[in-house]
Image (spheres, rainbow, N blue to C red):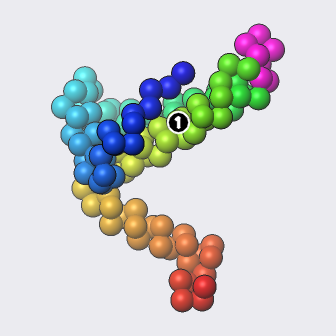
């Protein structure tokens, strides 16, 4: 159901891959400007919907389709959501890594307390 690259095929640097995907999308997008930006953000909703479809399929909750997905499909769709979100963030700022890292640190502190408290 999903195309998964072998681990040796996956680039080691997440952030350079996100930059590459952003550049590729920009070079190949038929829509640019504000409309292109909006579509890039809306792509997240599409990907989240695919997670929902995969979960429903893994549980066999659609009587017409039965079990149509696996939990590996759900994992793959969740990865698509994460990648799409990072590319959308890159669309908004070239400082993707710094923005994400700062936000993650704030979330960690809010949820888990300061790292020194652990």
Q: Nearer the viewer, residue 7 or 111?
A: 7
Q: Which part of the image, by quadrant, shows the N terminus?
A: top right
Residue 95, magenta (yes or no): no
User: What segment carries the magenta color?
Assistant: 60-66
Q: Residue furthest left?
A: 27
Indicate left or right for 23 with 78 as reference: left
Describe residue 1's horizontal placement relative to residue 84 as left or right. Answer: right
Residue 86 vertical position relative to residue 30 in the rendered view, above or below: below
Q: In the rendered image, is residue 92 in sight?
A: no
The residue positioned 53% from the left and 83% from the top of the image is: 115
**Image position, residue 99 (x, y; %):** 36, 64
Residue drawn at x 49%, y 42% as measured from the top left: 79
**Residue shown at 54% from the left, 35% from the top:** 77
Residue drawn at x 65%, y 29% as measured from the top left: 70
Question: What residue would you read off at disc 1?
Answer: 76
Q: Nearer the viewer, residue 24 or 6?
A: 6
Rendered location of residue 97, percent (x, y): 33, 61
Q: Which secondary structure lies at badge 1?
A: helix
Q: Is residue 109 visible?
A: yes
Chief secondary structure of the magenta span?
A: loop
Query: Where does the image place residue 32, in percent across and percent down from the top left?
Result: 24, 32
The reply, left or right, for residue 75 in relation to residue 25 is right
Residue 43's x, y, as percent? 44, 33
Image quadrant where one finds the C terminus = bottom right
Query: Residue 51, located in which quarter of the rendered image?
Result: top right
């Amino acid at each position: 159901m999903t195309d998964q690259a072998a681990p040796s095929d996956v680039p080691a640097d997440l952030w350079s891959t996100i930059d590459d995907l952003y550049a590729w999308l920009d070079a190949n997008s038929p829509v640019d400007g504000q409309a292109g930006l909006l579509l890039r953000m809306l792509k997240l909703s599409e990907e989240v919907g695919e997670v929902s479809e995969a979960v429903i399929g893994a549980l066999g909750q659609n009587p017409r389709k039965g079990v149509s997905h696996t939990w590996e499909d759900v994992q793959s769709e969740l990865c698509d959501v994460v990648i799409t979100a990072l590319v959308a963030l890159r669309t908004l700022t070239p400082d993707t890594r710094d923005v994400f890292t700062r936000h993650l640190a704030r979330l960690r502190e809010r949820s888990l307390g300061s790292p020194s408290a652990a």
